[in-house]
Amino acid sequence: MSGGRPLRRPRHGGSAGLLLALAVTVSACGGGPAPTSAGDTLRVVATTTVLADLVRQVGGADVTVTSMVPKGGEVHTFDPSPSDLRAVASADLIFMNGLGLDDWLGDAVTDSGSSAPVIALGEDLSGVTYQPVDPEPGEPVNPHLWLDAGYAARYVERIVETLAPIEGERSARIRAGGDAYLQRLADLDGWALARIAEIPEEDRVIVSFHEAFPYFAEAYGLTIAGIIVGAPGQDPSAGEIARLVDAIRASGARAVFGEAQFSPDLARTVADEAGIPVVTDLYSDTLGDPPVDSYEGMIRWDVDRVVDALDG
Amino acid sequence: MSFDPHDHPHDHPAERQLPSLEPEAVHHPEHARHHASVWMSGVTTGYDDRTALEDVDLAVDPGTLLAIVGPNGAGKSTLLKLMAGLLPPWHGRVEILGDAPGRHARRVAYVPQAELVDWAFPVTVGDVVMMGRYPGLGPWRRPGATDRRVVDAALDKVGMRGHEATQIGRLSGGQRRRVFLARALAADPELYLLDEPVTGVDATTQEDLMDILEEEARAGKTVIATTHDLACAAQRFQKVATVNRRIVAHGPSSLVLDPEVLAKTYGGHLLVLGDKAMVLDDAHHHDQPEEGESHFHEGAPR
Amino acid sequence: MDFVLEPLASAFFVRALLAAALVGLVCAVVGTYVVLKGIAFIGDAISHAAFPGVVAAFIIGVPYYLGAAVAAVGTSLAIGVVTRRARIRTDTAIGVLFAGTFAFGVFLYSTIEGYVADLFSFLFGQLLSTSVEDLVALALLGGLVLATVAILWKELLYATFDPLGAAASGLRVEWLEMLFLALVALTIVISLQAIGIILVVAMLVTPAATAQLLTVRFGRMMATGVVLAIAASITGLYLSYWLDVASGATIVLVQTAFFLAVLVVGPRTGWLARRRTGRSAGPDMTIGRRRT
């Protein structure tokens, strides 16, 4: 795909992965249109609503995209339902993020007997500086690349490279759609950078709920002073909260940001304790209702929430 | 209730051999009803689908000391529960102290079989006897000096003063029955309903408890007790009703407890040798647990 | 001293401490009757039944405790009716209700397409997120439960000890039973935020069961249970602070440790006591006497 790299398989894909990779190559080389039992559109399954939106923006009316994790759902701890497996089984193409975010897809693909190609959008991207989850070397990398609009553009490039060959005569339309979207993402990236630059530099210190925002922070010039939960589903102990509050006070963090798919109580507790404002509805892993129903809407929302909270 | 051996119309052919033992209430229901502490007419009841008692007629006058005897599963306890308002009649009518069962519950004291009591429960002798005062106190009010005096008097009467602070599980079988009788006394009731009050107790306790019950009956209280002990029923109770799903006979103990009646009540469980009758029935074996009942068994002492 | 004082500098810790102590107090009082009635399983069933209520409240958009209260009280009354009327064994009926209601909660949960806001935190509670409003609600509802017990303690005691004798002497035992189950339900609802659905049964049962090993008097059993529960809440929360472990679970573990310690070295039931007196503890001290 991008850079001629072979497709990355989900971690649990096993040897079936190789066959799937071949299937893509074959259909790509054959140049014919993909199997289109659902009318003329390509049936694409994405693991999250964010990835689904990226695919939809590129493919337009030529693809039917569904997300496995529903809007508002929690991707790290997701458990696919029978209808998710059915969607996977009948998919022509599957997009995942990879990097440990949505490893459960591997089992879902195996269980459903799907032979659709699986593309991991976040893995082995060129021009991306991966950040480890922990500072220690050899640790797994943080998967939340898409929260940097510049890195989301890398995802989009890979989507275009995947869709265009399959779609045959419509590939020009796909490429044109991709180019237009990449331009919008570039604009979005610039807008976010400019918007956050409005905040005085010493105020650009935040606390996030889970480990979702390092790329966002890196891209737009924020410092993350602390994280409330190490892993989603694992609440901090009283001692950890107390130390986090100390860290917040020491760092001068200006606000605590909870996320829409998690309970706001903990974020509120930490913020109250540290005496700083709390924003409970940042979006990271999932889209929501308008205006947060698209990737662009989500980034605009998050940037506006951050600026409102820090530039007060 | 007067006893008239010559008056014997009845509905049940099976009872024709024992006409003299028919209760008067059947013949003069309205008359008996006005005086009676307990009055039942044509009562049938049971548990779920199982009939335990059928077509029971019974009238018990105030001041009566009545024993209910019969084999296991004959419905003795059921009869008491009916009187205590713990079980509704399916058919027929029941009046207790002149009204529907439960209406005058505070004037009724019911003592369950020892097997139905959780003896490990963290209550002391004093606590249990004080419970007899609770219904009269009502919510909000805590037991006061009067209540404590009544409890002390009741404990005195049953010979359990000084044991107030003992947990009930540490008492002997006889002491346990004494304490529960004291609880009934503390409630100062008009009607005592006692399920096996003297079963499994030593002779002294049996004599003491019967003396107290006799005294209560003399004072005009109605005392109805089930028992397995025919000798006790014959010697200490003024009247006896024999039960086997129906009232087989009811009248003065000396007349009711004859071999013919007993044979009819106990069926094959009775051994008659000359003029002596012996019930082949385990007196310590209680009835099968009924719906919603829990029986408590002591762990075997090591 | 730092060991004790340092955590108190954090307001959230103080709120959690108050909440845990209050929940321990109310649970121990109600739990005394739960243990004596032998209905721990019913308590567990009611707490699981609260889950569909929490989820439904979220879907409808009302406060979680309203949904939890409706579901828990409703189930407790259903259990009251079932144990009285059904012709199957009570524990079987409750097992059916227990699993069925909880499964319904998970089912409802899985139908939610929108923001689920971490409803599963109710399974284990979020003691550390106790807000001032939570504390106020806890104090009010807990006060309601305690006041009801204060008014009806002797009636509840009589009806628990000897339901037949109590009913025959004029206490409305069926009514008291229903009221008591509703009190259990309310106690569980106020404990959900702190302890969660899965562990709340321990708060109800363990301190009272420990107290039962220590005393033969009802009043002392309740008082001992309350002291043990509050001690476990405080010890558990401090331990969770210093050991960096989950607070609700640590509190329950401390309660369990108290129970096991009393079981082993307690003055009445412990093996030390038996060895000293050289005799069995006696029938009244037998633990876990079965109702046949």
Image (spheres, coloured by chain):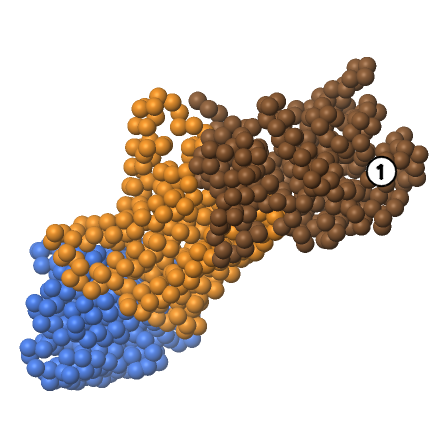
Chain colours: A blue, B brown, C orange
Which residue is painted at 32% across and 75% down in the image?
A: A288
**Is residue A6 shown to the viewer in this render?**
no
Q: Is residue B187 above or below residue C189?
A: above
Residue found at the far top of this picture? B274
Q: What amino acid is found at the position of numbered circle 1 in the picture? A: Ser
Q: Quadrant of residue C141?
A: bottom left
B88 or A253, which is in the foreground? B88
Quadrant of the rendered image containing residue A78? bottom left
User: Residue B288, how many percent across, how many down?
Assistant: 64, 34
User: How many marks can you see?
Assistant: 1
Please tell me which residue lies in front, A194 or A83: A194
Tell me the chain of label 1.
B
- A49 displayed left or right of C8: right
State the image coordinates of residue B187 (x, y, percent, origin top left). 59, 45
Q: In percent of the image, x 68 and y 43: which residue is there?
A: B191
Label 1 neighbour load within 10 Å: few <14, some 14-19, many 20+? few
- Whether residue B217 appears in this view of the structure is yes
Closest to the observer, A74 or B7: B7
Helix, strand or loop at mark 1:
loop
- Image quadrant containing the C terminus of chain B: top left
Residue C201 placed where, x, y %? 39, 50
The N terminus of chain B: image quadrant: top right
At a point 11% along the width and 82% down the height, the residue shown is A199
**Which residue: 72% across, 48% down?**
B96
Q: Mark 1 sits on what residue?
A: B2
* C205 to A23, vertically: above or below: above
Figure quadrant of residue A128: bottom left
State left or right for residue C100 relative to residue B64: left
* Residue C289, x across and y down, in percent: 47, 35
